[in-house]
Image (tube, rainbow, N blue to C red):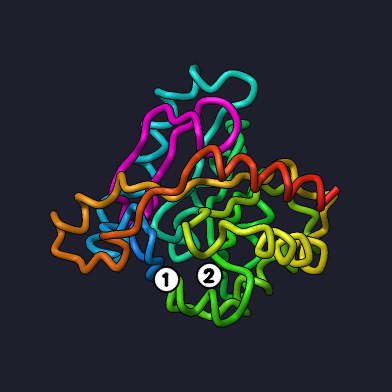
Amino acid sequence: MNTCRASISNIESLGAVDGPGLRTVLFFNGCHLRCKYCHNPENWLRGKDNYNVEDILEKIKRFKPYYGDDGGVTFSGGEPLLHADFIKVLAVKLKEMHVHMALDTAGIGLNEDLELLKLMDLIIFDIKDITKDGYQALTGGNIEESLKFIQICNELHKKLWVRLVIVPGIHDSYEYMDDLVKYFKKYFDLSNIEKIEFLPYHKLGTEKYEKYHIFNPYKDMPPMDEKRCEELYDYFKKQLN
């Protein structure tokens, strides 16, 4: 029996937003970033390794009949790259079962290990921000590691879904959209991108900060207006194309 273990906070049986089709979504604990808008702050710390590969395989086998032609498994978090060894062992098994796999990541923590990325069918990449100062202010991290991750995805010709949370007062201007277009054209191989998503900042995770006694820097930040978010997306897409 394989003794490889990981810290997982939640297993969503059949999610519909974290990749194509219906998917089992594994939320791994542990993250190097501290995004101010994070809606899963309970996943920041790694915590106890509470699942082994066999545990997860048994669950996936039960859910697999519901995946259909498009669904599969998504590794999310937290930051799943921090559990790369576990995911690689699991991914080899899932390949044998012909299960589609997606990695939802900020690209932080790869550590030159490309085998995990090679096993993935889809990378869901979270941009966070597009400048060094903006990235540091929003996440506490260094943008250079995420840019290197994008370069590796380009070289491996990985299929990408790219996401950006639109935060009021930070990302919600046409000037920012113009800079975002430049960022995409500079760093991404656009032919690999299947989808670009703008996610309006919401307040759904607010109660978690209170529950876990975590300081919430965006406690008084209003949610992003969805119509405005759609307008910005339309403008961005026109400029990108």
Tag 1 residue: 33
Residue under the point 50% across and 62% down: 81
Residue 16 shown in magenta: yes
Q: Is residue 1 visible?
A: no
Left or right of 200: which side holds 56? left
Marks 1 and 2 close (CB-CB < 8 Å): yes
**Could you tell me which residue is drawn at 21 percent across and 68 percent down?**
215
N-terminal of the pair, mark 1 or mark 2, is 1
Which residue, given by chain and number where applicable, does mark 2 sit on? 108
Q: Percent from the top left, x then y, of residue 19?
A: 57, 37
| Residue 198 highlighted magenta (yes or no) | no
Q: Amino acid at mark 1?
A: Leu
Other-residue count near label 1 (Cα within 10 Å), few / some / many at <14 / 14–19 / ≥20: some
**Disc 2 residue type?**
Ile
Q: Mark 1 or mark 2, which is nearer to you?
A: 1
Seen from the viewer's position, the closer of residues 229 and 119 is: 229
Question: What separation in Å lies between label 1 and label 2 (alpha carbons)?
Answer: 8 Å
**Residue nearer the viewer, 119 or 53:** 119
Give the image location of residue 94, x and y in percent: 55, 38
Give the magenta-colored segment's residue range.
1-28
